[in-house]
Image: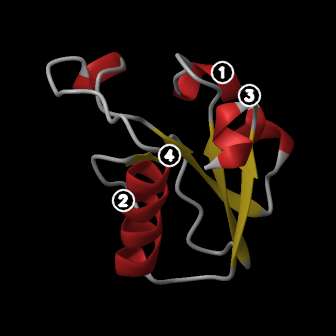
Amino acid sequence: MATEWIITPRPNPRASVRVILVPHVGGSPTTFGGWSDRLPAATVGMIQMPGRGNRLHQPALHSVHDAAQHIADEIWASGGSPTALFGHGLGALI
């Protein structure tokens, strides 16, 4: 499930669910450090927004709608297990 948008630190091929975590404004996947350990029955994916972390060279998005659409497209394209989303701050809005 790892993509440019979704970082998956510990893929779990036996997981019955995947959890996608969306950080707060200015946040990164490190915001959710340790969640993979706390959710051993799930595959945990963390959103890496453009303009942050290893995508620092890419222009940041200026629209919540655009961010939500890109993330939805990535989740849809990756297929797989039922998916739960969790966002913090702006990540919840997205």
Q: Identify the residue shown where x is 75% and y is 31%.
A: 89
From the image, tell me which residue sits under label 4: 64
Q: CA distance from mark 2 to mark 3?
A: 25 Å
Q: Is residue 32 above or below residue 19?
A: above
* Mark 2 or 1: the one toward you: 2
* SS state under label 3: loop
Q: CA distance from mark 2 to mark 4?
A: 10 Å
Of the numbered discs 2 and 1, the one sitting upstream in the chain is 1
Q: Is residue 3 visible?
A: yes
9 left or right, relative to 6 = right
Q: Identify the residue shown where x is 49% and y is 42%.
A: 47
Bin the neighbour count of mark 1 within 10 Å (Cα to Cα): few under 14, some 14-19, many 20 and up.
Answer: some
Residue 34: assigned label: 3
Q: CA distance from mark 1 to mark 4?
A: 19 Å
Residue type highlighted by circle 1: Thr
Residue type highlighted by circle 4: Val
Whole-percent x, y for residue 71 in the image: 44, 58
Q: Is residue 2 above or below residue 48?
A: below
Q: Is residue 79 above or below residue 24?
A: below
Whole-percent x, y for residue 41 in the image: 80, 63
Q: Identify the residue shown where x is 30% and y is 32%.
A: 50
Q: Are marks 2 and 4 in contact (CB under 8 Å)?
A: no
Residue 70: assigned label: 2
Q: CA distance from mark 1 to mark 3?
A: 9 Å
Whole-percent x, y for residue 13 in the image: 56, 71
Residue 78, quarter of picture: bottom left
Q: Nearer the viewer, residue 39 or 19?
A: 19
Q: Is residue 33 visible?
A: no
